[in-house]
Amino acid sequence: VHANSNVSVGGSDHTFDPSVTYSCDFADGGSSTTYAHDPKKTGAREVPSEVASVTYASFAPCDFSYPNPINLKSRNEVWINAAKTQLVSGVYCFGNSVTLIGDDIVGNVTFAAMGGISISGSDHNLTAYHPSGILFYSEESTGPTQINVSAAGGTYQGIIYAPNGDIDFQGQSNHTFQGSLVGQNVSVGGTGLTIQSGTLMQNANPVVRLAE
């Protein structure tokens, strides 16, 4: 976990397997959080090279494209089953914002949006489809938060990237996030969230990237 400014941890019963480093200040306002290593103050770091050059255009050609704000549950063509719990594998491009709310959702997907991304539900199991390893990408620079995730149970694997904005990731009920969070500002909270290093910068220093 690294921030080029501050790291602030809230909630309870989280587990951080990688190291926690920061440039300015560190605050843990939660309870019963476990750190594999003591948090350490370091200098600023560059955006990881694997994602530094990624833009919305990097995801073309897209398997699904939607120009207007959309609730993905309303689109029958992206679901394999009638219960709308299994997504068709591929890259999903959104010219505006996207919302996905529901339980027991699985899929090998990448969401790339010019607007915001809002994901919530329980027992999701999502893995990144795009070769970059990016699971969610938002290019938006306006609004309070560009990527909002509220996950209970299940597992996400991949990079969540908001190069121009903020990420709010709330994990509950033993949700496991395997990957990296990269954004201008990143907030992590909830109860019982486990964050494990993904492949980003793994050869040099395996960390979860929390902020630019």
Image (spheres, rainbow, N blue to C red):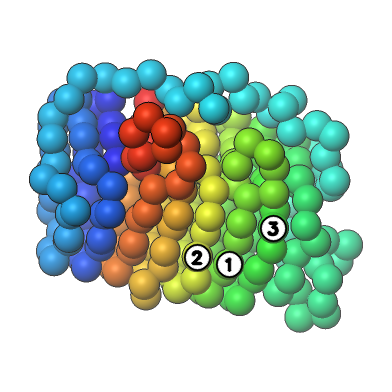
| Residue located beneath label 2 in the image | 155
Q: Residue furthest right?
A: 77
Residue 49, can we see it? Answer: yes
**Which callout, 1 or 2, points at the residue further toward the start of the chain?**
1
| Residue located beneath label 3 in the image | 108
The residue positioned 83% from the left and 71% from the top of the image is 80
> Where's residue 127, x and y in %?
61, 56
**Which callout, 3 or 2, points at the residue further toward the start of the chain?**
3
Q: Quadrant of the N terminus?
A: top left
- Classify 10 Å Cα crowding around label 3: few (below 14), some (14-19), many (20 and above): some
| Residue located beneath label 1 in the image | 125
> Where's residue 132, x and y in %?
63, 36
The residue type indicated by label 3 comes to: Asn
Residue 36 as seen in the image, left or right of residue 134 = left
Q: Secondary structure at mark 1?
A: strand
The residue positioned 61% from the left and 76% from the top of the image is 104
